[in-house]
Every structure is written in structure tokens, then in C-alpha cells.
Amino acid sequence: MRVSVLGATGTMGGLVVKALLQVGGFAITSKVSSSGGIEAMFNCSDVIIDFSCPLATEAMLRSAEENMSHVPIVIGTTGLSDMHRKLMNERAVHAPIFCSPNMSPLVAILNSVVSFLAKAVDEDFDVEILDRHHRMKKDAPSGTALMLGRAVAQARNRAFDDVANFVRYGIIEQRKRGEIGFSVQRSGNVVGTHEVAFVGALESIKVKHEAHSKEIFAKGAVKAAQWLVRQSNGLYSMDDLMKDTISPLASL
Ligand SMILES: NC(=O)c1ccc[n+]([C@@H]2O[C@H](COP(=O)([O-])OP(=O)(O)OC[C@H]3O[C@@H](n4cnc5c(N)ncnc54)[C@H](OP(=O)(O)O)[C@@H]3O)[C@@H](O)[C@H]2O)c1
């Protein structure tokens, strides 16, 4: 299978190249970075894997549209906005598109557990989400923290933007019922830790995922690419890839 890597000179791109070589069965036909090459990817790829930056992801999606491409795309880049989501939805009419802010299978399970907990306990339980990452990370809160927050809001039938609280500074008044609080730490070379706490007056429950190596994300993206090329056009996430594993939790 011919694969192009967008962001190939970066930390994640390098790990994706390593994972592709380890897994085997892939020919890496183009490695794209800020020095150019996005346009050329579509004619030489059976699948594209993107770990770059929001600007490059946007350029890639627009270029795919201009090229009327049907090439499946796996997007791992984070810090994406509603504009990116609109572009992905438009693209998904013409090609299979996979996007996840976290390619770890265990984080997909965590997301389902969080969704389950949010349904199992009421809003007397305050939800606090903590993300810890290395000092180089450019976006905050992490895409994963936002995904977990959205899972809570959705499970509680709340609009995420109404309940998410990203800023606490100065006189902040009392915590609102149903609020989802976000805390962010950036230091050293922490790969990525996410904690979601449901805190009640008499008891609490906390779930946590800790990534020990970024290789897990690269391996997850390669697995997603292998899976995506067999799918029809549409927008997919880790929930789709992991459906068999997480569906028992979703039905609880
Ligand atoms: N989904 C997940 O599981 C997951 C896990 C970890 C990280 N991430 C995300 O993956 C992304 C990349 O992370 P990283 O640590 O690998 O970053 P990085 O080391 O800074 O690498 C960024 C890559 O993007 C390229 N790039 C930057 N601007 C570009 C442009 N305008 N056009 C084309 N390429 C461009 C860079 O090329 P140059 O070298 O030429 O600048 C480099 O190859 C981030 O958004 C990060 O949050 C996702």
C-alpha cells in the first residue's frame, strides 16, 4: 500500500514512518513537511497519514478538494477548529476520513468509560479534567481533554460550550452545576496524561490514562490507515475502529 506522511519531519511523523516500516506492507511514497509537497501527495498515495499542524491540515484538505481526490486520510493533528471539522465533513462525502486527537486504543476505551460514568452519576458530581503534556505542546487544552469533555457533555445532554470552563482566575464565583472544569499542565517531556474526576460530596471516582511513549499514537494511526482503506466514504474516529471493544460499554 502506498502511503504519504504529512509532517514526516516532525516527532510524530518520524514515529509513523518507523511504525510503517515495522508493520510492513507499506511503500512510503512521499514525506511532506513545511518545505512543500502537499499537492503531489494525492497522485502517489493509497492513504495519507497527517501529524502536522492545523495550518497544514487545512492546506491538505483544501488541496484534496481541488484535486477531487478519493484518497483516504488519517488525521492525528490536534488544535483543529470548527472550520477544519467542516472541511473534513465535506471531504468525507468523497473519501474515507479518519480523525482522532488520540490514536491510543486505551484512550478510546477511557472515552467510553467516561461517557458511561457521566450517564451513571448525576450532575451532583462535579467533573474536572486534567491534561499533562510536555513543554513543546502547542495547543491547550489537549484535543483529548476536549474529546473527553465533549463525551461528558453529550452523555448529560448538555451543549459542551455552555458547560466547559477553561479559565479560573481572580474572583470566579461559585462553581456552576454541571460545569466541566479543565486544568492544563505543560512541563518537561511528559508524553501525555489525562484524568477525569467525578467528585461528589461524599465520594469520588477518577479515571486516568498515562501514555509512556508516543509510539502508541503512531502505531494507532497505522492501524487506522489499514482499517480506513477498507471503509466507504465517511468521517470516522477511534470509536468506529474500536467498535467491537467498546460497544458493550456503550450499551450499558
Ligand atoms: N492524535 C494523536 O494521537 C496525537 C499524538 C501526538 C501528537 N499529536 C499531534 O500531532 C501533531 C504533530 O505533533 P509533533 O509533535 O510531531 O509536532 P512537530 O514535531 O512540531 O512536527 C510538525 C510537523 O508538521 C510539519 N509542518 C509544519 N507546518 C507545516 C506546513 N505549513 N505544511 C506542511 N507541513 C508542516 C513540520 O515540518 P517542518 O519540520 O518542515 O517544520 C513537521 O514535520 C500535533 O498537532 C500534535 O498535537 C497527535
Image: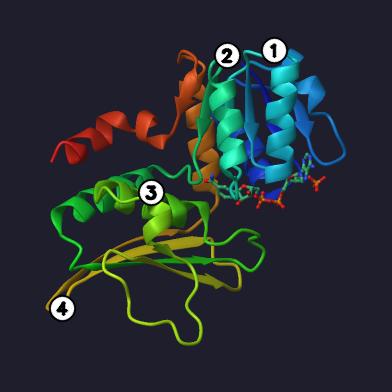
Q: CA distance from mark 3 to mark 1?
A: 33 Å
Q: Say which quarter of the image contains residue 188.
A: bottom right
Find out whether the residues at labels 2 and 1 contact each other: C-beta distance under 8 Å: yes
Q: Mark 3: which secondary structure?
A: helix
> Element at badge 1?
loop
Instruction: Give the mark nearest the N terminus, 4 or 3.
Output: 3
Amino acid type at image mark 3: Val
In this picture, is 155 found above or below 139? above
Precedes in sequence: disc 3 or disc 1: 1
Depth check: give the residue in front, 248 or 220. 248
Left or right: residue 7 compared with residue 238: right
Of 43 and 78, which appears nearest the observer?
A: 78
Q: N-terminal of the two: label 2 or label 1?
A: 1
Q: Earlier in the sequence, mark 2 or mark 4?
A: 2
**Nearer mark to the viewer, of 3 and 2:** 2
**Separation of marks 2 and 1 at Cα, in angstroms:** 8 Å
Q: What residue is at 57 percent from the left and 14 percent from the top? A: 94
Q: Residues within 10 Å of mark 1 (few under 14, many from 20)?
A: few
Q: Looking at the rendered structure, which numbered label has been put on residue 94?
A: 2
Is 244 drawn above or below residue 140 in the view shown? Answer: above
3 vs 1, front mark: 1
Q: Which residue is mark 3?
A: 107
Q: Which residue is mark 1?
A: 68
Three-letter amino acid code at the position of disc 4: Ala
